[in-house]
Image (spheres, rainbow, N blue to C red):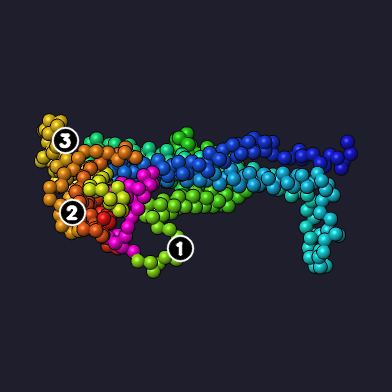
Amino acid sequence: MNATENEQYLSRRTTPTWEVELLISGVAVFAMLQLPGWLDDRMFALEPRVDDDWRMVLALAYFYAKSAAVVLAVTFAMHLLLRALWIALVGMHSVYPQGVRLERLRMGPIQRAIEEARNETTADAIERADNRASVVFAIGVSVALIIASVCLGFCGMLLLATLLTQAAGWQLDPLNMMAVVFAVAMVPFIAASWLDHSLAARLPPDGWGYRLIAALMRLYTRIGMGRRNNHIIAILSSNGGERKVMAVVVGVMLVAILGVFAAYYFMRTGNVPGSYAHFPKSEEMAIDPAHYDDQRDPARDGALPYVQSSVIVGPYLKLVVPYRPNRDEAAMRSSCATRTTELAAEALASARLACLQDLHGVALDGAPLAGLRYEIASDPRTDRPALLAMIDVRQLAPGRHELRIARPPRAARKPDKDRPDPGFDAIPFWR
């Protein structure tokens, strides 16, 4: 076999895992592209079922899990593109083993001199593309694992703090409690690292200070905070520059988490990017599709009261008011506690229904509806508990009408000066 024929084969320095990398990226990229949407659906389905304390646990788990999924999806897609570039270079090197022939390209003398001085062969470009693809694959997988580890640790601590505060009946914010526990757990490690950098070289190895720092560092290394616990990042940092690698890792994490948060904000608020600054905005006058059963998206819209349609044809308007734990539960505990203590099951259900009926009074065209009766029901498309009222609208004149359903304020939430809570949900409809 001559030298020209040998050059058409892969270099011995080709990454030995390239086939496995392509297999993983090709198989997993489709699943990772679908996973963020699946997480969105699960988040919007579970969020209305929990109160504010559990919503914090759910939201953090969602943000971290979706960030890891996005990082993996982008990593696998980029890796496939980079591997495709590498394969294309290998193919071109097989077809044209002589490489780039500068004498056949139209260039000025200055540009030709610069290109000739580079002295880069096709084999060098192939090796660089091969290494770049492997590094992107390694960084993306490592960052996703770091986010997943932070999710498990952070959300696990918050879950434990929430369980303890609710079981003990403490009036403590679980997030503040978890922050205190996290600080207590991390302060010794930060102090030991600082002392190791600044003082350990001057301490005698047999002294108590040296032994204390060593014991703390050994403990934290065993629980997963050593520099070589993430071997991939350690290899990249020690060979490619620690500051550069850490900047890339932290930057990818921040971009992923902030991107997920921004996407969630736009999905939750219904705002869309664009030049709509001068379009009128009013919660009282706006028509929200989530208030109409034939227009709402039960997988993404919030748990809002709704009627069957914006145009009511039959004799009855069907009003469904979903139960919202973050608003209704705290209001029931504070305003209906005397009604729901030491009652039998049926009497307790009747008392709680009466309490919810008082909390969700209804006004039609500005006048309170006398004799409104709620039934215990559920949202058939989300299987969430709800109140149902059938309102007789046969005597209403043709034209626009409006329902206003009272809602209790959220517990433990400061009022927003820019967006004050009107205290009701408005549903316009037409006869």
Q: Earlier in the sequence, mark 3 or mark 2?
A: 3
Q: Earlier in the sequence, mark 1 or mark 2?
A: 1
Q: Position of 407 compared to 221: left or right?
A: left
> Circle 1 — which element?
loop
**Where is the C terminus found, in terms of image quarters?**
bottom left
Q: Residue at x 81, y 54 (%)?
A: 100
Magenta residues, dominant SS class: loop
Q: Which residues are magenta?
A: 281-307
Q: Is residue 365 above or below residue 306?
A: below
Nearer the observer: mark 1 or 2; the answer is: 2
Alpha-carbon span between mark 3 and mark 2: 33 Å
Nearest the camera: 424 or 123? Answer: 424
Circle 3 packing at 10 Å, graded few (<14), some (14-19), many (20+), is some
Residue 424 in sight in this render: no
Alpha-carbon span between mark 3 and mark 1: 48 Å
Nearer the observer: mark 3 or 2; the answer is: 2
Q: Residue at x 20, y 48 (%)?
A: 391
Q: Position of 393 compared to 13: left or right?
A: left
Q: Which residue is mark 2?
A: 395
Q: Which numbered dot is residue 274? A: 1
The amino acid beneath tag 1 is Gly
> Circle 2 — which element?
loop
Q: Is residue 310 above or below residue 385?
A: below
Circle 2 packing at 10 Å, graded few (<14), some (14-19), many (20+), is few
Q: Is residue 159 above or below residue 81?
A: above
Q: Which residue is mark 3?
A: 349
Residue 405 in sight in this render: yes
- Where residue 280 appears, as percent x and y from the top left, is 35, 66
**Where is the N terminus found, in terms of image quarters?**
top right
Magenta-colored stretch includes residue 142: no
